[in-house]
Amino acid sequence: MAEVSKLRAVFTLLKNLVLAALLYAAIYGIISFVNDPSVAAKGKIGIPAFLDKTGPTELIETTKSGVKVKFAGTTKTVTINPHANVFNRPVTAVKNKDDYLGPRPHVDTEADIEMLIEECRGTYAGIEKMRRPFDCLKFFAEGEDRYYSLPDPADRASAQDPRKADYIDADGHGNTLESYPSIQKAVAANGSDIGICPGPIVPYHVYWTGPATWRVEAFIKSYLYTQNLACSRLWLWLDSDRNPKAVYNMLNKDALFARFLPLVERGDVVVKAWKFPSRIPLATDTEDKNGFDYYSKPGTPNAKGEKDVAENIIEDKSGQQWLVLTQKQMTFLPVAVSDAVRFIVLHIYGGAYFDMDVLMLRDMRPLLLPKEHAFAERWAAHPHPGDYNTAIMSLSANSSLSSYLLYGGIRMGVNFHPRVLGRMAWKDGRDQEFKMFETAAFDPIWTEFNWDREGRCTVPCIRDYSAVFKGKIGGVKDEWESYDGPQLERIDLKDAQRKELRMPTNGTVSKRGDENVPTSAAAPTPNHGDKAEHPDSFQATLDEEVELRKAGVVSDYVLSQDKFPPNNRTLENFFRGAWTYHIHNQWVKHPEPSSWISVLEHAHDGFLAGKRTNPYGEKWTGPKLMPYNYWPEFV
């Protein structure tokens, strides 16, 4: 009897386990189905149904706050005030001057980096001006005739031998040409053609992990808005150590990034898989400056002719030296992967590195052309000459300095934190080779944020990193306290531009692999890693807008009913003179309408729609791109 009971109990347990396994499999299958657009039901142009926002919109109910609406592009219910919403709100209350920077600098223009640093720092020992960002920005904005110059013809970057360039693929032909194309043969980027650069093509590197988010979109659009596209390439490095299918997913399954696929096709954006290399070429330390500490007697060559010449360094039979990482060191690298990526990528490929939460405001090229263009920026207002921040940095490929910094990161315990390497460089007397810009150049409120500022506040006067996302009246205190320019010209709100809402005509589909991908898809923004990113931004279609207007959900604009009314913020007065603005990891912030970030978005969208110019007075002639998505709480 006891044996029967035991068998029954075992049978019951097995049955429960099987049922639990089936339930788990069903739940897992549902989750996978929802999260993987490639297996979702297809819409009528061959894209996942939840992206195929053909409407109709669903009017749910009218409340005191407005009309509740269900759009096809978002799972959330959106409340619309008929008289103040994204469909009818003017983007500004004053006249915009889009071409406020004047003509773009000549393709060979170089900046005097020493002058830019000294005018904002003072002396190396005294740092008398370091805490005065207002004065620094004023010099950047008004002093171009002093710090920009066009070298003599023989000394220009375009006159140099591409085969000796310190950028990867500087001539667009693998650094094999004997000379760069002449200025007469130059062609600006246009349509589906990336153009021809009459000089070195500079690579801009960024690193990302996970699906694309608003941060990726904002960075890429700021790059398109400001840089010389025929003479630049944006290299997007995706972490393929964590996800081997990162590149495939970005090019085939990422709904937000799909809007940039035409630029991948054209060559503006190069999507690359990032994997930590097990060996990295090094410049031979002939002057004994790089800290390699060569062995007095090299090791015995192995079967491949390779011999140990220093710790972690081998030399092959051709004389090329390599930094070789042990398996133990490789396991430590991903702890601070992005800190290491920038030093390794710049050492191998050259150019400039940017964190993805940086927004470009000016053409970076004049800073990257001088022969001595290795730089980063100061860590806030810290006075130590080794306290670097490398959110933006530049190095020559396979140079003595890049080799020194790379090997130093390994020597310091696989630690690539900029302040660790910076202190090392200072101790070894090499910090002045790695030039340090003051924060006003790339991160103009960092000094203010740390309460270290002296003198006047910047324009706008922003005291915390969340302020540029605020659009309500009174949301930012005293932002104009340092402005002493002319009175901004008011415009009639009835004639003001509205947000760019139109999807490109006939949303085309680009084929990659075996899947169709909409080049103009707009969709919920996926999560970025473990951060609480914006999972439900969306784009409305023209049909949906027409429906809403017919139903009276979108009516005439009434200023008095707007929580985020148009104001006097213009990009012309957004840290004028700075080359970039650093958002600083505001991962969960959504730009409120009429905020400074919203002003920047409108400028990007207007330019990419061909209706406004960029700061250099240039019109966009490239492929049509989707405007920024909406956040449900701010429609």
Image (tube, rainbow, N blue to C red):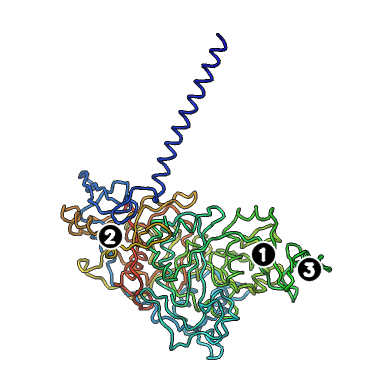
How many numbered marks, from 0 up? 3
Outermost residue on the right side: it is 297
Task: Decide which of tag 2 and tag 1 comes sooner along the chain.
Answer: 1
In the rendered image, the quadrant that contains the N terminus is top right
Q: Residues within 10 Å of mark 1 (few under 14, many from 20)?
A: some
The amino acid marked with disc number 2 is: Pro
User: Along the line of sight, which residue is nearer the eye, 223 or 166?
Assistant: 166
Q: Residue at x 20, y 53 (%)?
A: 82
> Mark 2 or mark 1, which is nearer to you?
1
Q: Residues within 10 Å of mark 2 (few under 14, many from 20)?
A: many
Name the disc covering residue 272, or none: none
Task: Decide which of tag 1 and tag 3 comes sooner along the chain.
Answer: 3
Element marked by disc 1: helix
Q: Residue at x 71, y 72 (%)?
A: 320
Element marked by disc 2: loop
> Mark 1 or mark 3, which is nearer to you?
3
In the rendered image, is residue 147 in sight?
no
In space, the residues marked 1 and 3 are separated at their CA atoms by 22 Å
Which residue is disc 3 drawn over? 294
Name the disc covering residue 423, or none: 1
> Mark 3 or mark 2, which is nearer to you?
3
In space, the residues marked 2 and 1 are separated at their CA atoms by 48 Å
Q: Looking at the picture, how far across and down is residue 317, in whole percent? A: 74, 71
Q: Is residue 241 above or below residue 175?
A: above
| In the image: residue 560, left or right of residue 116 | left
The amino acid marked with disc number 1 is: Arg
Q: Looking at the picture, how far across and down is residue 196, in whole percent? A: 44, 80
The amino acid marked with disc number 3 is: Tyr
Name the disc covering residue 565, or none: 2
Outermost residue on the top side: it is 1
